[in-house]
């Protein structure tokens, strides 16, 4: 298979690459969302700890 | 056993496991993509379009596999009241929903060139769509109840009722006359698929499994942090590792 054939996928390029593209997007989102939430949760908990120390 | 079920122990263990699982996932994924896109020959009936199978079939397997795990963990949480099982079930739902969406979307992209339609109200497709709504329902129900323990119990009951849909999805291609083609892997020992196509399919399936394991651990760690925020171990950890 040469590169031209690889990209056109025998005329099914849109469907094949569309499928792999959505799959990549789903995997990336499944990594990004929990990692972002971790940052937010830790940030919020640290602020809460800080407030508690100040009011003590 | 109790040691492993303690949220603190699990939090630390999961954090240590994630880099290893990530490495294994990357290796499996690269091998699967290489064999699936470069090595496997084109199909004599479907040409190159069949390569959608390498993401579609593993995604569909995951959609059912994760649901069974989620309902099973829900049952364990209901019967033995184990907090970690609740956290696992909750963490499964969004990942399962995303794999179900992926199975439906890639199925649609495969159906258009092969069947001439993006969608048909066929038994396999409809039961998979119901699975997607079950995941969404689980997440909505769980989010609508404030007390996390009551929320988990209500959602677990919903998940258990929805389990009847799983055999319906699996056997739909045998029970009804469907547009959907029969299973890619038949009975053990008599695969209806050539080894050059079977290898990338299995590699991608294992890659999706280890990906799920890694990302479910990330989500569980987040939920443990939130639920245990008033405990001393979380406070101490946040103070020592800012």
Image (spheres, rainbow, N blue to C red):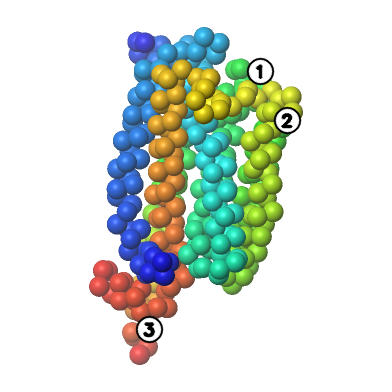
- Viewport quadrant of the N terminus of chain B: bottom left
Residue B77: % across, % down: 56, 64
Question: Of tags 2 and 1, which is closer to the observer?
Answer: 2
Callout 3: SS: helix
| Residue that label 1 marks | B116
The reply, left or right, for residue B41 in relation to residue B85 is left
* Residue B177 to residue B152: above or below: above
Q: Earlier in the sequence, mark 2 or mark 1?
A: 1
Name the one closer to the observer, B21 or A10. Answer: B21
Find residue B111 and report its image quarter.
top right
- Please tell me how crowded label 2 is: few (under 14), some (14-19), or many (20+) other residues with Cα within 10 Å: few
Residue B87: % across, % down: 50, 62
State how far apart marks 2 and 1 are (Cα). 23 Å
Q: Is residue B79 visible?
A: yes
* Residue at the image position 67 percent from the left and 28 percent from the top: B173
Q: Chain of mark 3?
A: A
* Residue at the image position 64 percent from the left and 43 percent from the top: B166
Question: Of tags 1 and 3, which is closer to the observer?
Answer: 1
Name the one closer to the observer, B137 or B1. Answer: B1
Q: Chain of mark 1?
A: B
| Residue that label 2 marks | B175
State how far apart marks 1 and 3 are (Cα). 63 Å
* Residue at the image position 65 percent from the left and 64 percent from the top: B154
State how far apart marks 2 and 3 are (Cα). 62 Å
Q: Residue furthest left?
A: B240
Q: Chain of mark 2?
A: B
Callout 2: SS: helix
Are discs 2 and 3 both within one chain? no
């Amino acid at each position: 298979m040469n590169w031209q054939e690889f990209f056109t996928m025998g005329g099914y390029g849109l469907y094949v690459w569309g499928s792999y593209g959505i799959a990549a997007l789903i995997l990336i989102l499944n990594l990004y969302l929990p990692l972002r939430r971790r940052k937010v949760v830790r940030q919020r908990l640290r602020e809460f700890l800080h407030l508690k120390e100040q009011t003590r | 056993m109790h040691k492993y079920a303690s949220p603190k122990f699990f939090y630390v263990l999961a954090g240590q496991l994630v880099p290893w699982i990530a490495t294994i996932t990357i290796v499996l994924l690269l091998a699967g993509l290489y064999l699936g896109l470069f090595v496997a020959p084109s199909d004599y009936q479907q040409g190159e379009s069949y390569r959608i199978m390498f993401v579609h079939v593993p995604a569909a397997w995951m959609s059912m596999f994760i649901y069974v795990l989620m309902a099973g963990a829900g049952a364990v949480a209901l019967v033995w009241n184990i907090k970690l099982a609740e956290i696992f079930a909750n963490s499964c739902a969004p990942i399962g929903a995303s794999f179900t969406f992926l199975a439906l979307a890639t199925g649609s992209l495969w159906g258009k060139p092969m069947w001439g339609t993006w969608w048909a109200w066929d038994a396999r497709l409809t039961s998979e769509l119901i699975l997607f709504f079950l995941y969404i329902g689980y997440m909505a129900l769980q989010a609508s109840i404030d007390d996390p323990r009551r929320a988990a119990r209500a959602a677990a009951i919903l998940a258990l009722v929805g389990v009847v849909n799983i055999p319906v999805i699996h056997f739909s291609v045998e029970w009804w006359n469907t547009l959907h083609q029969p299973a890619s892997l038949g009975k053990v020992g008599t695969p209806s698929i050539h080894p050059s196509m079977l290898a990338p399919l299995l590699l991608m399936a294992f890659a999706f499994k280890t990906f799920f394991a890694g990302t479910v651990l990330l989500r569980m760690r987040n939920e443990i942090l939130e639920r245990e925020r008033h405990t001393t171990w979380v406070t101490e950890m946040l103070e020592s590792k800012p």
